[in-house]
Amino acid sequence: MTIDMQVFKQFAEQIPHLGERAQPPQMADHKRVSAAKETFVRKLDARMAVDLESCIHCGHCASACHFYVGTEDPKYVPIRKLDLLKRVYRRELSPLRWLHRLYTDDITLKELQEWQELVYDSCTECGRCSMVCPMGINIAGMVNVMRQGMARAGMMPAELMAMEQEQGVHDSLFGVGPEQMKGAIMQLQQSGLDIPLDKHDADILVTTSVIDIMLFTDGLIATAKILNHLGLNWTLRSDGYEAANFGLLSGCERVQKIASERIVLAARACGAKTVLIPECGHAYPSMRWEAANEHGGKLPFEVLAISEFLGREVKAGRLKLNPMGREKKITYHDPCKLARHSGAIEEPRWVLDALGVDFREVESNKELNWCCGGGAGVFLINSASELRQKAFEIKMGQVEKTGADSVVTACGSCRLNFMNGSMRSGWDKGIESLVEIVAEALPVQQSSEPAKQTTAS
Amino acid sequence: MTLLDFARGPALEWSLMIMVAGSLWRLVGAFMVRRTADLSEPRSHSTVAGGLRTVFTRMWPRKEFRSETLFGVVAGYAMHIGLAIVVFLFTPHILFIDSLLGVSWPGVSNDFVMFAGAITVAAMVALLIRRLTTPLLKAISGADDYISWAVTMLPVLTGMMAYAHIGGPYQTVLAVHILTVELMFIWFPFGKLFHAVLWIPSRAQLGAAMQRRGVKA
């Protein structure tokens, strides 16, 4: 099942105008600098302190970064992206700050402006640099702190600002809010698909994303078919359906919390034991790892990515699939936020194994995968277009080497970036969604009763 | 008081005090920056094992990164191993450590130590040339890199000069050698030489954090 490229093109045509909707905050220059610094100091913790004290300036992180490898421009060396954070640390928090202040300059507005490109356009927070660093420095985590400081200073890219503001204020993305979502679901219901909406009692709260509603409707349909096939008690809820979190992507902590709390409240309202995250890379760590800390306590439900859920169901023998045959040659692209950031690595492979396809791994895979170049909101940043393409070419080369006919992934952003990159390069590989190919392989049930299920765990 | 007496006496005492006190200050200070509990449900509880594993596995790059990092890794190991042989297996150094701490061990032949010293010098020169000529390294290098290089190189060079009886009267060259070692002691807590302390906690915390998420770092 592949998406209509015409629909994708219509969606892509909106992106150049996305930033026009942003309403940049009016702030005095000195207030921008102090807001960024205050955020850096507030977010820096002991782990980051040890990391910032440890760097030996070996430059190995560059060899792991798709933006550096794609351009060979020294400004994109990952550890350099933390220079401003490091200087604030040295001047304000370091145990040797009394000494560092003598020769370490304070950060300036001009530098913050310069660094916007380095922490947004040229970093997907993929974390591959941490896998090569001989000191084990978590660069991506600190780039996120840089983004949070930039966001407080009102200096995020206009595209992410527009999305963050829309999500925070209107509870919508690309103009799709709860009412539009309900309308889309009703249309699917009218077509005969059983999609429970706004149930008060459900074991599983299924979340979706604006991308699935607007573009990858097949992904949403596939999810519904699979859950119905398994006979699970699930629901979508109009008060907590959007898994994409533009607060996290832009660095706006306030909106990040608002977006994740909507899902927490919706899950509580229906008594869900499981929250299922759609094929949306960053949405998973947003709920799986970040939400509890924003919420201020352990979440009363389990958070599963759809790829993780499918893998577990297959492994447990609850989800049987029709083999697709060895003539289907595929490879899998590990979304960074699912694999390296979250450990959902083997589950999609269990699914592909159950599908009986000719599965071919790319050379650097699983927790060492190359990012496709579009993560962490970079796909929407217009000024990052060329950089993104250079990063994508690395991925493209990897896929080519496998000899696979198509790439399967479990992240809508990755899929969009693959499609965009393919369109620009005239690449002919198929780009498929894991959940969609699983839905295609569901066996036809003999009786009208769904497969009996008691739990989803 | 001769220069050698000064080097072996007050200079040694003060430099050691600065190194120990400064190191404790920097280490404890970094660990005392704000800590927050992670309230998310871990995928794995084996964080200690994960941390320890990363401390060891990061000693050699994974095959995916090997070709790009090979030069730095091999030169780095040559420099560190050579330096360790010179510092800990040269008989006069063992006698010096014995006089300070009361512990000793057998040394190796002087020729072998000189060979190790030469390897160290060659590796350090190669690393410096690479730092000065590679755009990516120039972009992330600062005074600390060059000071740390110099205060490491000087004791090796002056030590080899003292052993070979070149560069002036032996007593003077020996005194200069000891003073350069003391310069390194003094610089140790302030610059990147401190990675000799931090490599374990920094690797361990990444390994533990990733293990918590079910990923082998």
Image (spheres, rainbow, N blue to C red):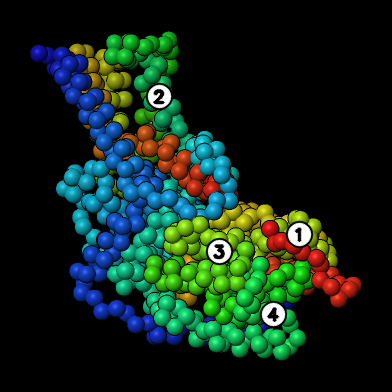
In which quadrant of the rendered view does residue A167 lie?
bottom left
B176 horizontally vs B40: left or right: left
Which residue does the numbered mark 4 point to in the structure image? A195
Dot placed on the residue nearer the N-terminal end, 4 or 1: 4
Whole-angstrom CA distance, mark 4 to mark 1, is 22 Å
Q: Nearer the viewer, residue A265 or B23?
A: A265
Identity of the residue drawn at 31% across and 52% down: A86
**What residue did someone put label 3 on?**
A284
Measure the alpha-carbon separation of dots 3 and 4: 22 Å
Note whether A7 is above or below A360 in the view shown.
below
> What is the count of numbered marks?
4
3 or 1: tag closer to the N-terminus = 3
Look at 54% across and 83% down and name the residue there.
A178
Please name the amino acid that badge 4 sits on: Ile
Dot 2: what SS?
A: helix
Give the foreground label among 4 and 2. Answer: 4
Neighbour class for label 1 at 10 Å: few (<14), some, many (≥20)? Answer: many
